[in-house]
Amino acid sequence: MEQFSPTAKTTLKRLPKRGVFDRTTVYKILDEAFICHVGFVVDGQPFVVPTGYGRIGDQLYIHGSAASRMLRSLAEGIEVCVTVTLIDGLVLARTAFHHSFNYRSVMIFGRAKLVEDAEEKMAALKAFTEQVIAGRWDDVRWPNEQEMKATSVLVLPLEEVSAKVRTGPPLDDEEDMELPVWAGVIPLHLHAENPIDAPDLRSSLAPPAYATNYIRPLAEE
């Protein structure tokens, strides 16, 4: 399916024209971002936890310490809401009310489950690494048995999903167009500076190309 099917949870109530259910758009946003926020409720207390993630096909993987309260709670199959947001620009209008952001965001609902298969778990750990910087997994030592035991991985099927996107200039009211106030958009981009060697790095080792020429996936499109 090229589109996610809207549900009562994913259908936008406010500014529905910004809602996007196209799978390609959703996956581009997920693949470009670093961090997701995981929302869940335990014993009536809501929590929202920022964490890294990785995507493989139609599955989103979340990982952390095996002792993590978030991972232990989600592994019990409780409902979860995961959000990802990219900010593309500051939208400055002529009036304070109409200031905004250009952004791309994704919201995911579902129930996560613990990944117990060793091959799937290793594939997820690779996805986490490649989410941060493509090409790194092939250079580093992979997790050993002790590290695997200390790490929990959860998988969340990408089924109940929607994106919300804003682009373009400010939307001022007609009566405010003649105000002597500058209006427009300040584009924002993630900029990587030159890599800094670890203090204990062997002097013969130079940064790899993916470090010196770092760019987020799809950011150039």
Image: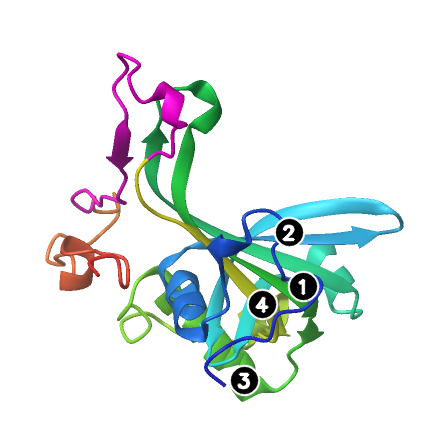
Residue 161: image tag:
4
Question: Which mark's residue is nearer the viewer, 1 or 4?
Answer: 4
Q: Which residue is mark 3?
A: 120
The quadrant in which residue 138 appears is bottom left
Disc 3 secondary structure class = helix
Disc 2 secondary structure class = loop
Seen in the image, is 71 located left or right of residue 53?
right
Question: Which mark's residue is nearer the viewer, 4 or 2?
Answer: 2
Question: Which mark's residue is nearer the viewer, 1 or 3?
Answer: 3
Which residue is more in the foreground, 52 or 82? Answer: 82
Looking at the picture, which amino acid does disc 4 mark? Val
Mark-to-mark CA distance, 2 and 3: 37 Å
Q: Is residue 177 magenta?
A: yes
User: Which is nearer the N-term, disc 2 or disc 3?
Assistant: 2
Which residue is more in the foreground, 21 or 174? Answer: 174
Region of the chain picked out in magenta, as a range? 170-195
User: Which is nearer the N-term, disc 4 or disc 2?
Assistant: 2
Mark-to-mark CA distance, 4 and 3: 23 Å
Q: Which residue is mark 1?
A: 66
Residue 184 location (% of width, % of height): 26, 30
Looking at the picture, which amino acid does disc 1 mark? Ala
